[in-house]
Image (spheres, rainbow, N blue to C red):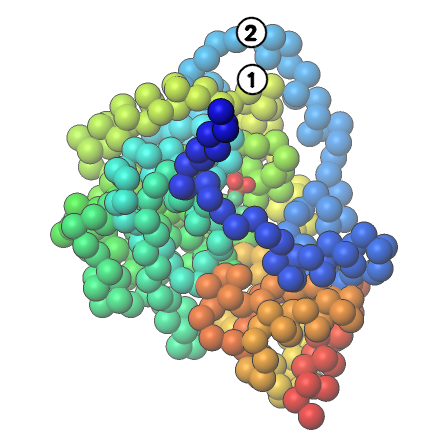
Amino acid sequence: MKPLAIAFSKRTAWDTTETALAKALRELQQSGGPVLDLTASNPTRCGFNYDADSLLAPLANPSALDYDPNPRGMLHAREAICRYYAEHRASLDPEQIFLTTGTSEAYSFVFRMLCDSDDEVLIAQPSYPLFDFIAELDDVRLVPYPLIYDHGWQMDEQSIRQRITSRTRAIVLVNPNNPTGHFTKPWEREMLEGLSREHGLSLIIDEVFLDYSFDSSAAAPSFAQGEAGVLTFVLSGLSKVAGLPQMKAAWIACLGPQAERRQAQDRLEVIADTFLSMNAPVQWALPHWLATRAGIQNQIRARVRENLAALDEILAAQTLASRLALEGGWCAVLRIPSIHHDEKTAMALLAEGVSVHPGYFFGFLESGWLVISLLGLANDFRRGVLATLHHIEQESN
Ligand SMILES: Cc1ncc(COP(=O)(O)O)c(C=O)c1O
């Protein structure tokens, strides 16, 4: 008898063929050729000084030998997260916090709590392409709403309103957004809360880059601050806040009207209890990592500023490319002449040893956009930008 073929789920029927760009980058790296990497986003590989003894010592806390599972995460870790928010002028109770192994897991928990199969979640475009796979795995449909650029990025109420249907459950927003680097303004928060109240939606606010504002005069406002008028989930984690993506620690802060918030917390508790995904050593170490985050944050802020200043100096000497206004984050968006598809430009740059993100990767719809990371070593960054602009000049002649 001929054996029946194994049946897999439709949701995992992905085309996993490597893109031409990913293949070209891999081949270049394997050949040992030098790459000026303008996509570097892993802080542990950008030449920052991590205090190994201080960071690793708390992982050896003997208390971690005891297994004391708590679906929300250990109390002392959640109290440390409340202290982080207190420093952002937000008053939270530890019962509002759920620890997760990453912001990605946090998204997934919230999607599963709010959405049935084929329910819809609105997401900004352009934004970080993290959500597509999470949504697919959770059977949620993502509906993009456009951000408008006019001397700075902003939301457009009408575009969001037009996309709300009876299946819409939540609006996702990254504050400040990646890669556009703009913070949500008070009028936008009011508008989003109004729309959410009107249609019974929740807000999912990703604030992983909250601490990386270019305005050093005041801490940027978090959605955890003030009275949330609607059910709101603020997501963040150590990957950006403490520059420790490898430690896999993030959280969901639940806000909003008490009755709805309690219901959400009860449901989240069951989801979190099903996985109990946090490990003890990381939870014991988390308060120390949060308390000492200034060490890495100051280095990252200095690097990002230095690279942005170098970018502006180089851009000032030519007229073909420009950068969009930026308020925070680790990226810059470049407008370049729209001569070729951005993938072709990125491939041609790779052939010259420079790696950049084509705009479509972040959801820029037309050609003429490159996204570059401001995190890399200053010398490589400068050389990469000079090579990029030289290439653009050659192509335009
Ligand atoms: C906006 C945004 N959210 C979430 C993440 C992922 O965070 P985590 O490492 O906590 O899953 C990233 C990663 O770059 C990001 O850019």
Q: Where is residue 63 drawn, in percent x and y?
A: 59, 10
Q: Residue furthest bottom?
A: 397
* Front one among 304 and 387: 387
Residue pictured at 65% horizontal, 69% vertical: 346
Earlier in the chain: of badge 2 and badge 1, it is: 2
What residue is disc 2 on? 66
* Residue 78 visible in the shown view: yes
* Residue 374 visible in the shown view: no
* Front one among 3 and 79: 3
Which image quadrant for residue 242?
Answer: top right
Taking 330 as reference, is 196 left or right?
Answer: left
Asked if ligand 1 lies within 8 A of label 1, the reply is: no
Residue pictured at 56% horizontal, 76% vertical: 341
Q: Residue furthest top?
A: 66
The amino acid type, in three-letter code, at marker 1 is Ala
- Label 1 neighbour load within 10 Å: few <14, some 14-19, many 20+: many
| CA–CA distance in space, label 2 to label 1 | 8 Å
Q: Where is residue 393 drawn, in percent x and y?
A: 70, 86
Residue pictured at 24% horizontal, 60% vertical: 163
Instruction: Decide: is 241 above or below 332.
Output: above
* Front one among 359 and 61: 359
Label 1 element class: helix
Instruction: Decide: is 196 above or below 7.
Output: below
Q: Where is residue 31 drawn, in percent x and y?
A: 84, 56
Say whether marks 2 and 1 touch (CB < 8 Å). yes
Instruction: Decide: is 109 above or below 122.
Output: above
Taking 330 as reference, is 164 left or right?
Answer: left
Label 2 element class: loop
Q: Residue 280: which disc?
A: 1
